[in-house]
Amino acid sequence: MTRRLVAYPDTLSAHPGERIKFMVNALGGGDYRADIVRLRCGDLNPKGAGFKETVVDSSIAGTYKGRRQEIKAGSCAIVDDDVRLSGLSSFTLTAYIWPTTPDRDRQAIIGKWCDIQRRGFALAIDEGEATLLLGDEKGQVDRIGSGTALHARQWYFIAATFDAETGIARLIQRPLDPIVGGPIEVARLAAAGHIDGDNGVPLSMAAFLAKGLRPIARYNGKIDRPRLASAALDDAAIEALAGATVPAALRDVVFGAWDFGRDIKTDRISDRSDARLDGTLLNLPARGMKGHNWDGSSMSWVATPEQYGAIHFHEDDIYDAGWEVDFEFEIPAGLKSGIYCARLQQGEEIERVPFFVRAPKGKATADTLFLVPTCSYMAYANETSTLPSGGGEHTMGHVISYGAEDLFLWTHPEYGLSFYDTHIDGSGVCYSSRLRPILNMRPGHMTGWICAGGAPWQFNADTHITDWLEAKGIEYDVATDEDLHNEGIALLQRYKSVVTGSHPEYWSTPMHDALGAWIRDGGRFAYLGANGFYWRIGFHETLPGVIELRRSEDGVRDWEADSGEYYMSFTGEYGGLWRRNGRPPQSLVGVGFVAQGFDVSSYFEFQPDAADARAGFIMQGIDPKERLGDFGSIGGGAAGLELDWVDTKLGTPWHTLRIASSLMHSNAVMLVPEEIYSATPAMSGRDNANVRADVTFFETPGGGAVFSTGSISWASALAHNNYDNNVSRMTENVLRRFVDPKPFRMPAE
Amino acid sequence: MFTIDPKRLDLAAEFRAQPVGIHSPELQAVLTVMRSLPLDQRYILIRRKPYQEWVLAQLTGVRNEPPRIYHDKVYSSPEEAEWAIFKLRWHHATGEELREEDLP
């Protein structure tokens, strides 16, 4: 049970008249059929809203020849071939390294090595130790190892020299902390007589390059201050070469002194030697990483770049799959804004690739905007975090289930990881790209840790909202998080009302700024989910389709950023929770994350504020004595999965009405870490009344208002009883009023 | 550490009646122990058909290695599979077979 047809688009959203390219991998070849479908609901649950899609007449409809396209994962640095490199005879190579998986197979550090011809020279880790590789034009190879194993996560200085005149090769392996071990030096006559740098491959770091720039011998760990000189230097000169700057006495022989503390926001590496052999990075290794000389005096690479001269490479880093285009779809004029998919079919195998069609550029075609939380989809892209952690059953309260997508991803690590995963070396995944198939962002996808047997989450769960909007005849446009990031408040200002997805968790600063300003300027905002506005992320300044997260300091974290590595490399901003950046979700939308649990959902009871005249329009046609949302297709209730509550200390506006609050949550629904200052046995819904979701409402200056449901499973209750239920009624009451131009008034104090 | 008392068949009956959801503190303690098995023995479910068919598998403890199918029995609800796993773990923890007919 696996996947045989997988694809991705080059962009997630487009206006009519714009084109979207689709890249397809047919793993077994063969023809496939392609269509464009409009998606209303992706839920396969027979007791839920039902799977609803409609084929749209399109120019791309037809049969295509499938072909195999592969992903070449693994990050590395590449310096284009140059006569100064290919002509080298004697040399010195040095670097500071912090290996994280020294026991794995051969891993390149720096060199010009053609692995097929076994020609060139390189510093590497081989058989767990620092190793010099030499290969001459006759195919004679010499491997000189230190003979002493490297320890993971320790800084070492390593160096190698080769003197073409004497044939003597030297290798140095020296831990920076003497408790790790003493310095090792090996020197002997090399078996390879004449090294051959003229081997047609570039100089590379952290991998060797096979045909088609495929990284091989991929390294896991940090490299700092890689250096190359065109002579076999003595000890004093090696020491000088490893300094921060190029010593004047060595200027003529230094062909590379790369400073990774420069250009941290980019995918470039700068050579500070006169050779100016600048390079580029492939597949986004982690930057803004502590170097060998980090002393704890500064926590920010922005303040002390000279202490952040390391790049952390991973064999499973991936930025852009870079596949050939299989077809292009031009959004026809007049195509209604909404969620669409390229539907690819090959026998029983179906791949649906979602994209979001916007209103014509600069226009709105509806009063309501559904803001699709694509940053959160990217954050979860290809998440398999419960597999290596043993299922996460304690947390989830049920056995985890896995489907075809999970099993495919588990055996295809080259498709890349999510912000919830750790790299093969245990370090956290801090970049996530959409330029690869994202198999858990698919209609019909079930997430195995959501409820017994699995249930929709993120993208697929959000189609409960589009399904309901269509059932109620509420006209809507769609736009993505990325659109909001790029266009700012002007996008929101075109709409009377904005509706979120069920879990809009990840927000860049420009997104947050735009929403905050719009809400205070009269916008009407319906937050139909929970654990939103939680993590601060950054977009890359030049590379499209990739975001960054640092899981720093606090919050529900599947991994923890290393101390001193809380500042994002893409933006220089302090990463982590918005709460830890002075903007708790409560200050934006009235409620913020308090508890989570993924076994069963619960219901709400109305609170005294429900009787307030200001809430009259919300409560219209609803009996306040009823339970609110004692039903739902995910966990059986409208209060579940992740819960938000009010907290005036964290900025809930003074006049917020708490209309309803949930109760009766299970043993597996627990407070989040930032709500606990030290451990307590009163953690779960069984023993702590703070484990609850709040439904809230408040007015804003300028005639606007904010309605928040405080619960992710809210959307799963909308379709209950053929859309006739109190959750649906309340949501409809709010959204109808939100498009009424009559201003809301702030209450008198 | 809490150990599972094989005489507490009432807790097994409680689980049988509601495998997922609110549990008594004592059943929760049993489940906490059961869910702490070593990584290479963790039970998972493979979803063969959404909302219809689940099969029981075990993780191998090795990254990127496919889970091992435990046996070919197909469960038609996750609750049924939860109960099967509970019985396996009960036996693992206590050495005693948990038989449906012994439940109070």
Image: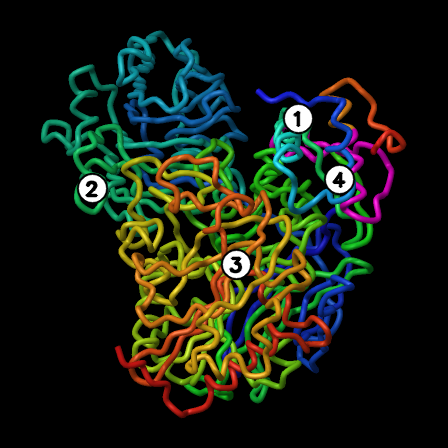
Q: Quadrant of residue A78?
A: top left
| Residue closest to the far left | A248
Q: Which numbered disc, 2 or 1, marks the residue closer to the eye? A: 1
Q: Residues within 10 Å of mark 4 (few under 14, many from 20)?
A: many
Residue annotated with mark 1: B40
Residue annotated with mark 4: B82
* Residue type at the position of mark 1: Asp
Is residue B73 shown in magenta?
yes
Magenta extent: B58-87
Q: Residue at x 34, y 35 (%)?
A: A562
Asked if disc 1 and disc 4 are in contact, CB closer than 8 Å, the reply is: no
Q: Residues within 10 Å of mark 3 (few under 14, many from 20)?
A: many
Give coordinates of residue A624: x percent, y percent.
56, 74
Q: Nearer the viewer, residue A242 or A164?
A: A242
Q: Residues within 10 Å of mark 2 (few under 14, many from 20)?
A: many
Between the C-alphas of marks 3 and 1, the distance is: 30 Å
Residue annotated with mark 3: A377
Disc 2 is placed on an element classified as: helix
Give coordinates of residue A182: x percent, y percent.
29, 8
Q: Nearer the viewer, residue A225 or A727?
A: A727
Residue annotated with mark 2: A305
* Residue type at the position of mark 3: Tyr
Disc 1 is placed on an element classified as: helix
- Specify whether residue A434 is in view: no
Q: Is residue A278 left or right of residue A657?
A: left
**Same-subunit check for callouts 3 and 1:** no
